[in-house]
Amino acid sequence: MPRLALDTHQYVKRLKSVGFTEEQAEVIADEQKRLIEDQLATKSDLNELETRLAYSLTYRFALMLTAAVSILAALNLYG
């Protein structure tokens, strides 16, 4: 799980300073931290994305190369 640079202690103190109880402030801070962390990409997520992107680019390059060779062959045959 990625580490979040959210200072929950400061967050709780700030919430308490505007009228939240200790319990309310802690619940809000913990939930906020969880919601943010759930949206962060992990190293595994990035590795999977990199692999999928490399495959996609390789596949597209192969298709373009095949099309180019086919076009050149057709031009040479009929030219």
Image: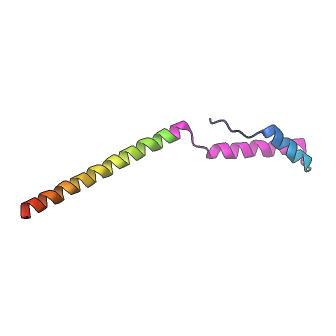
Q: Is residue 17 left or right of residue 28?
A: right
Do we see residue 24 in this rendering?
no
Residue nearest the viewer, comparing 74 with 22: 74
Question: Does 70 sit above or below residue 1?
Answer: below
The image position of residue 11, as x and y in percent, is 81, 43
Residue at the image point whose x is 17% and y is 57% from the top: 70
Q: Main secondary structure of the magenta part?
A: helix
Question: What's the magenta region?
Answer: 20-45
Residue 59 in the image: state x and y as whole percent: 31, 49
Instruction: Pinpoint residue 16: horizontal percent, then vertical percent.
Output: 89, 45
Locate residue 8 relative to residue 40 in the image: left or right: right
Percent across and percent down for residue 77 are: 7, 60
- 12 to the left or right of 37: right
The reply to whether the magenta stretch includes residue 25 is yes
In the displayed orientation, state which residue is furthest to the bottom. Answer: 78
Q: Residue at x 66, y 35 (%)?
A: 3
Q: Nearer the viewer, residue 63 or 20?
A: 63
| Residue drawn at x 7%, y 64% as measured from the top left | 78
* Image quarter (top left, top right, bottom left or bottom right) of the N terminus: top right
- The answer to which quarter of the image holds residue 9 is top right
Q: Quadrant of the C terminus?
A: bottom left
What is the total number of numbered labels drawn onto the structure image? 0
Q: Is residue 55 magenta?
A: no
**Is residue 70 visible in the rendered structure shown here?**
yes
